Image: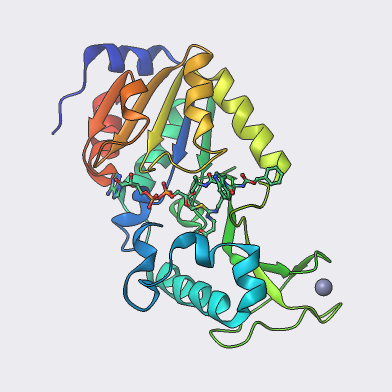
């Protein structure tokens, strides 16, 4: 059982509002490759920015569609892990708990988290690439299906590089960051903006900043507490310690 600094436990015990930002690292122990690892195997020769962009989709819709179909398969086969479940438990302790995720895998919701702020969309949803709205889609790999309304290609309902985040989600995440007393950044490389700004905004507004990660990130130096190790072990142990 990892030991936690008394000052961190006191901050978490006296807090009323706690915000958590998660990245792909929280789903790693569910067997979903992290974003940087999602270029393993067949996709190893592509950089994320070469697949997760509107230009990549326009240039080669089938390649991008197939990549998401492959990832959708991995996510469907995955199960929430103890890290996801510990966040459900943590939410029960605070009236003002906010869970913000960069992940598109929906595993927080499958673990039982409610009101998840999805900054980058959700891989299970598709929408019209010409913006005429959401659509249903059960197709696997192969050519993107046509939009039932306008015939344009359907695309994953995720935020690609160069695309703006859903304004309502970003506003809710910003408000959670500046109002919380403790902000936990869990399993994210803290490289992608504007999500990576949130922990900085929280700290700037006076929150205690905690990083849970296997490795160092650009945020580590700014964190008040660094809990080094897998989220699937650290988060349950932290919840246990608080109970
Ligand atoms: C925007 C959805 C502008 C899709 C994602 C140059 C060119 C173009 C853009 C930019 C540029 N420079 C900067 C930008 C902005 C860009 C950006 O930040 N780029 C980065 C690369 C520098 N941002 C954008 O483009 C954003 N939009 O800025 O729009 C704009 C503004 C106004 C108006 C119009 C437009 C959009 C960003 C969203 C992109 N979409 N995902 C999909 O998933 O397919 S981002 C993608 O990477 C993920 O969703 C995730 O959010 C992000 C980061 O990944 P992480 O989650 O952190 O995962 P990663 O693999 O990186 O790290 C895993 C971490 O977990 C590691 O630290 C590891 O140590 C740790 N870990 C592993 N296992 C564990 C663990 N920790 C704990 N326990 C474990 N077991
Ligand atoms: Zn359409």
Q: In this view, does 243 lie to the left or right of 158?
A: left
In depth, the one of 58 and 224 nearer the eye is 58
| Residue pictured at 57% horizontal, 38% vertical | 194
Quadrant position of ligand 2: bottom right
The number of numbered discs placed on residues in the rendered structure image is: 0
Q: Is residue 84 above or below residue 75?
A: above
Residue 222 in the image, given as x and y percentages of width and height: 36, 21
Seen in the picture, residue 233 relative to 240 is either above or below; the reply is below
* Vertical side of 51 occupied by 143: above or below: below
Q: Residue at x 49, y 71 (%)?
A: 72
Question: Looking at this view, is 174 or 217 the one in front?
Answer: 217
Choose top left, top right, bottom left or bottom right for residue 157.
bottom right
Q: Is residue 147 visible?
A: yes
Q: Residue 17: in sight, yes or no?
A: no
Q: Residue at x 55, y 84 (%)?
A: 140
Q: In which quarter of the image is the N terminus?
A: top left
Quarter that holds the C terminus = top left
**Residue 100 on image: x %, y %:** 53, 39
């Amino acid at each position: 059982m990892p030991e936690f600094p008394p000052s961190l436990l006191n901050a978490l015990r006296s807090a009323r509002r706690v915000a958590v930002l998660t990245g792909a690292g929280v789903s790693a122990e569910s067997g979903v490759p992290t974003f940087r690892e999602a270029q393993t195997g067949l996709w190893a020769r592509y950089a994320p920015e070469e697949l997760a962009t509107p230009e990549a989709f326009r240039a080669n819709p089938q390649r991008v569609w197939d990549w998401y179909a492959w990832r959708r398969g991995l996510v469907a086969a995955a199960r929430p892990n103890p890290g996801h479940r510990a966040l459900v438990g943590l939410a029960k302790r605070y009236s003002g708990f906010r869970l913000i995720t960069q992940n598109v895998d929906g595993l927080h919701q499958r673990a039982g988290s409610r009101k998840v702020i999805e900054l980058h969309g959700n891989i299970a949803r598709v929408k019209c690439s010409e913006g005429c709205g959401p659509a249903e889609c059960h197709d696997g790999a192969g050519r993107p299906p046509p939009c039932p309304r306008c015939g344009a290609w359907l695309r994953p309902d995720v935020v690609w590089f160069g695309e703006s985040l859903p304004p309502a989600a970003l506003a809710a995440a910003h408000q959670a960051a500046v109002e919380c007393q403790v902000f936990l950044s869990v399993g994210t490389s803290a490289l992608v903006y504007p999500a990576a700004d949130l922990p900085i905004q929280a700290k700037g507004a006076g929150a205690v900043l905690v990083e849970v990660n296997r490795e160092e990130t650009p945020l580590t130096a700014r964190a008040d507490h660094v809990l080094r190790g897998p989220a699937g072990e650290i988060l349950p142990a932290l919840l246990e310690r608080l109970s």
